[in-house]
Image (cartoon, rainbow, N blue to C red):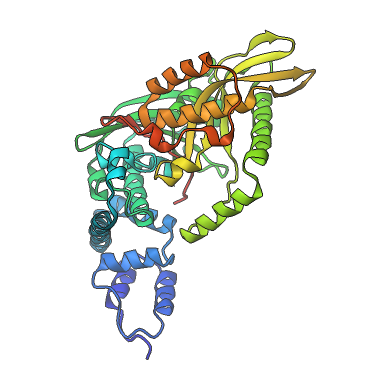
Amino acid sequence: MAIVSTPLLDRLLTDGVIRQDHHDAARQRLGDATAEPWGTLGEALFWLVDEHIVSDEDLAAIGELSVTEAAFAGNATRKQALAEMDALMQRKLEEYERQIRQVALKRAFPGPRWAWLGGGAIAVAAAAWYLFAPATPPQCDDADVQKTLRASLFTSRLQQMSRNPLAGGVAPADLYLATFSDVKEVGYIKPERSRGCTATLKVGEATSVLAYTIGPNDKGEMMIAGADPRVVRARYGQLDADGKPRDVGQPAGAARLAAAFEQGVAAFDQLARGAARKAAQDRQRERMGLPAETDTRTVRNIQPLGDCKDLGGGRWSCRLQVEYRDRLMSAIGRADWQVFEGDFEFLQEGDAWRVGEPFTRQYMDAIVRGRMAELKGDEAAARLEQIQRQRPQAAPTAESAPSVGALAPARTGGREHRGDGAVINK
């Protein structure tokens, strides 16, 4: 017998929380059920998300509308559904924690739970939303920018909880009360009409430094996108008087160094990982219900930090900042992309540039420092770099990087949000 009545689903449609295609797909998915399998609007919305009928983009839009359309009568249903979904996810989180809580996990991640989510509970970097398309982007402290950030924090938190109920963290509703302070413009790239910003976010008594950029996308629509504060400082903090990025990394230049570095990483990946590990990673994503990867890069945002030093004989030492896809950190709930800095040797052969012989050691050392910075802080990573420079120059293998357990985090106070820069369109 086909389902006869779906009052809660119908209410979500009538009050504009979901679209007609969502409603139709849900009715079809219910099949021969004789009643709705949920008892609240929040449970219905959670089911729609869990069944992939309501996408992450749709959920982000629902969360944003709950803020921007607060004065409309129909918004009450939207806010009720989100609040009930929030409460449901909190209950699921507590249930999972009771079932599989382990002492080792607690020891590995001390301090407030909100601080140890994938790149931080404040996963601004996991989303970006359209604002408007003025000639120049709004200022970093613009009220509409902060309103958009709060909405993105809320919906990103819901998405995190739906994917990983074990992660812990603040209630999504608390993020609506988040306050911003110490808002600064790091720089404004005039040719790109792009502004880089940092700010301190306070949720309750916890604080975190976050960064974001404001600028047009390829279609000319103005967007906000989260980023790692270190990446924003490096990119937007090296501008000339005309607001253009300085051509650092001389004599090679940023473009040649980035190309040579990417080639070196590709060769390293071919030797260290190979097709078998890639296939295993794909199977793991499938088991977790995640879509196939569309971004297969290992590194991105390769930025020289000043010019190179001449070592003689065509050898140059260049300090770079690089975003690196760290699957080990991702597996423990941290951000998929981490940041490291390091000195890398390059060889100049006429107009051609390639990484030098010590690249494997330098690259693996930098990855280890990136993990240390994420788990214990930049000062600990700097001390590790000094130790690495003093040891014998033996090239490590991919397996020689220390485990996450060996780098158990020590920080429990305020921290920087170091997140991904992926974009989710509204």
Q: Residue furthest bottom?
A: 1
Query: In the figure, 76 relative to 118: above or below?
Result: below
**Quadrant hosting residue 224:** top left
Q: Position of residue 21 (x, y in %)?
A: 44, 71
In the image, 96 versus 121, the foreground residue is 96
49 on left or right of 391? left
Tell me how many marks there are. Answer: 0
Q: Position of residue 65 (x, y in %)?
A: 33, 54
Query: In the figure, 15 relative to 133: above or below?
Result: below
Q: Residue furthest right?
A: 350
Does residue 127 appear anywhere in the picture? no
Does residue 42 appear anywhere in the picture? yes
Identity of the residue drawn at 30% across and 82% down: 35
In the image, 315 versus 223, the foreground residue is 315
Q: Quadrant of the N terminus?
A: bottom left
349 on left or right of 399? right
**Quadrant hosting residue 204:** top left
418 on left or right of 359? left
Query: In the figure, 24 relative to 124: above or below?
Result: below
In the image, 77 versus 4, the foreground residue is 4
Q: Position of residue 233 (x, y in %)?
A: 45, 24
**Quadrant hosting residue 397:** top right
Q: Position of residue 390 (x, y in %)?
A: 51, 13
